[in-house]
Image (cartoon, grey):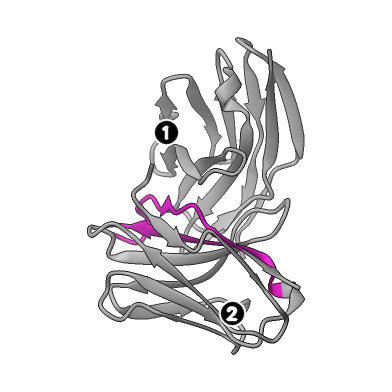
Amino acid sequence: DTGVSQNPRHKITKRGQNVTFRCDPISEHNRLYWYRQTLGQGPEFLTYFQNEAQLEKSRLLSDRFSAERPKGSFSTLEIQRTEQGDSAMYLCAGSSGGARETQYFGPGTRLLVL
Amino acid sequence: AQTVTQSQPEMSVQEAETVTLSCTYDTSENNYYLFWYKQPPSRQMILVIRQEAYKQQNATENRFSVNFQKAAKSFSLKISDSQLGDTAMYFCAFMGGDMRFGAGTRLTVKP
């Protein structure tokens, strides 16, 4: 167990609805990352925070996606107007220290858009 | 752009035997980190082993070891004395600026 938790673990929604996921890293994790993983593929980077500041966003993160880490602790990832192509596992990971420290992953939130 | 290639989508090994998973990457950076992560079925991804590019010595963690060939940009994982609990997806990852993952190798350990 890495100590990183994510909720909900599973989410089924209808196309066009908004969904929000939460990630709770351990307190030592000053960096927090979001990834998307589709079936049979490795995780793809979406965005990351250092403390409360969002420092980088991937081109994969369309304007329907928004992420926050308001107090530098937990983070939320919201998808507005979901599309079937958003169906995937959404992973978060935390790390402490510098940019190249090991990332510790949460169990993920599996999203299915009908 | 950095890319990570795992050329073996699936592999199998008999329990107690040794298996090697391959990984190659492409980068122009000189200072980076490499990782192998394990993702068991329906469970979270956990770190198996990590290698700093500036270190010539290959990393080892119990039954897991790597063969890091910097010039060849190769980073293979050797699992010795395979156990049933080693059955999982294994992802090779490169960290320069951001983290890039390979597509994974599905390893099945057979009793």
Which is nearer the eye, A48 or B97?
Answer: A48
For label 2, the crowd category at 10 Å Cα-Cα, with few meaning under 14, some 14 to 19 and many 20 or more, is some
The chain that hosts pointer 1 is B
Do marks 1 and 2 share a chain?
Answer: no
Residue at (52, 42) in percent of width and height: B37
- Would you place residue B51 above or below residue A107 in this image? above
Residue at (38, 37) in percent of width and height: B55
Left or right: B31 with respect to B110?
Answer: left
- Percent position of residue A17, x then y: 64, 85
Q: Is A107 inside the magenta-drawn segment?
A: yes
Q: Under tag 1, what secondary structure?
A: loop
- Would you place residue B54 above or below residue A56 in this image? above
Residue at (65, 31) in percent of width and height: B21
Q: To which residue does mark 2 refer?
A: A61
Instruction: Tell me the quarter of the image containing the C terminus of chain A.
Output: bottom right
The chain that hosts pointer 2 is A
Left or right: A17 with respect to A103?
Answer: right
The magenta span reads A86-110
Query: Would residue B73 be visible to someone looking at this image?
Result: no
Q: To which residue does mark 1 refer?
A: B56
As drawn, the residue found furthest toward the top would be: B16
What amino acid is labelled 1 in the image? Gln
What amino acid is labelled 2 in the image? Leu
